[in-house]
């Protein structure tokens, strides 16, 4: 009877394919990538969350492209339209929406990495701050 209790207690608990142990990915690397290259989703690519990384990359690069297009377009229209300055301001502000959404998302990811709540593709939290573990 004691043997049966010991074997049932040694079985690790799983939840949706993940174990209670942390990820093999370094929390320090994820933090540094999020801090310095978060605008291209590098921290998400590092932990294997490629879809999130691609979305962040598209938001930021697409937003900056829209910003450039808005400036060029509205600058050329401002000479032809009486309210060109107002159109320029509105165009620039609207084109920055994807960049601001992406920046807020990266900031939230940055806080989650610091707090230990950021997870890898297998939904395991990044526990270790060292690179070699």
Image (spheres, rainbow, N blue to C red):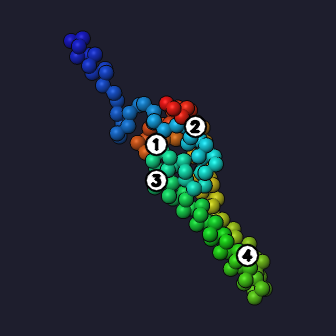
Residue 88: mark? 4
Give the quadrant of residue 99: bottom right
Distance (Cα) linking label 4 and label 2: 42 Å
Disc with the residue nearer the chain's start (1 vs 4): 4
Instruction: Answer left or right for 74 relative to 17.
Output: right
Q: Secondary structure at mark 1?
A: loop
Which residue is at the front of the view, 91 or 129? 129
Q: Position of residue 25 (x, y in %)?
A: 48, 38
Residue 120: mark? 1
Q: Position of residue 76 (x, y in %)?
A: 73, 83
Disc with the residue nearer the chain's start (4 vs 2): 2
Between marks 1 and 2 in the image, the one whose residue lies nearer the viewer:
2
Looking at the picture, does residue 53 appear above or below residue 26?
below
Disc with the residue nearer the chain's start (1 vs 3): 3
Give the quadrant of residue 74: bottom right
Distance (Cα) linking label 1 and label 4: 41 Å
Distance (Cα) linking label 2 and label 3: 19 Å
Q: Secondary structure at mark 3?
A: helix
Which quadrant of the figure contains the N terminus? top left
């Amino acid at each position: 009877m004691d043997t049966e209790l010991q074997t049932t207690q040694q079985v690790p608990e799983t939840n949706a394919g993940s174990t209670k142990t942390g990820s093999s990915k370094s929390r320090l690397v994820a933090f540094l990538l999020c801090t310095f290259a978060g605008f291209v989703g590098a921290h998400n690519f590092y932990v294997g969350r490629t879809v999130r990384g691609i979305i962040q990359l598209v938001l930021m690069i697409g937003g900056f492209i829209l910003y450039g297009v808005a400036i060029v377009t509205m600058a050329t229209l401002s000479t032809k339209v009486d309210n060109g300055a107002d159109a320029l301001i509105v165009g620039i502000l609207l084109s920055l929406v994807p960049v601001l959404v992406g920046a807020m998302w990266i900031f939230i990811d940055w806080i989650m990495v610091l707090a230990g709540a950021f997870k890898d593709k297998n939904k395991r939290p990044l526990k270790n701050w060292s690179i070699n573990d």
